Image (tube, rainbow, N blue to C red):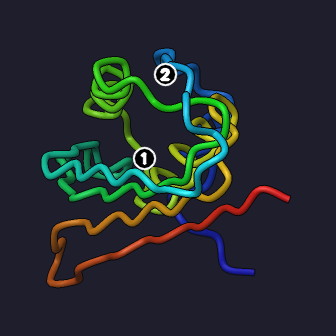
Amino acid sequence: MNESSYEGKQDDIRDWKTPKIEIFENIYPDRDYSITMTIPEFSCVCPKTGLPDFAVLTLNYAPSENCIELKSFKEYLLAYRNKGIFHENVVNKVVDDIVKVIKPNRLKLVGVFNSRGGIQTTVQREYTRK
């Protein structure tokens, strides 16, 4: 296995304490509908260079008992602004945190990260409640 200079730089991500995502009760849990949120100004930091990374995040979820409260979600996302984190870990961490809080029926998060070094990265994760 080839080692890289990135080893150990993301060990804290799964345990990173982010701001609380608040929720509100879904009064239509018996309906199958979805909510889409587009976050056109997401930013984080490259864990190697410390330079800013920018992305458009698109979240689509089918709520069950609860929905995401928008102001707290904005504050949650702002915590990434100064966090050194890989694109892949951004998408996985956000999905993990949302699923833990609202337990949606379905969820899909797509992160389209601006080109860096001539390479544009898109990371996508889907979740379906079992």
Vertical comparison of 117 with 93: above or below: below
Q: Quadrant of residue 96?
A: top right
- Which class describes the residues within 10 Å of circle 1: few (<14), some (14-19), or many (20+)? many
Across and down, in percent, residue 128 comes to 71, 62
Residue wearing tag 1: 85
Vertical comparison of 62 with 13: above or below: below
Q: Quadrant of residue 72?
A: top left
Residue at 22% over, 58% down? 55
- Quadrant location of the N terminus in the rendered image: bottom right
For this rendering, which residue is in front, 45 or 93? Answer: 93
Vertical comparison of 70 with 124: above or below: above
For this rendering, which residue is in front, 130 or 46? Answer: 130
Across and down, in percent, residue 60 comes to 43, 58
For this rendering, which residue is in front, 90 or 36? Answer: 36
Q: Secondary structure at mark 2?
A: loop
Residue at 45% over, 60% down? 109
* Amino acid type shown at disc 2: Ile
Foreground mark, 2 or 1, reads: 2
- Which class describes the residues within 10 Å of circle 2: few (<14), some (14-19), or many (20+)? many
Q: Is residue 31 left or right of residue 79?
A: right
Residue wearing tag 2: 21
Residue at 40% over, 51% down? 35
Q: Is residue 22 left or right of residue 44?
A: right
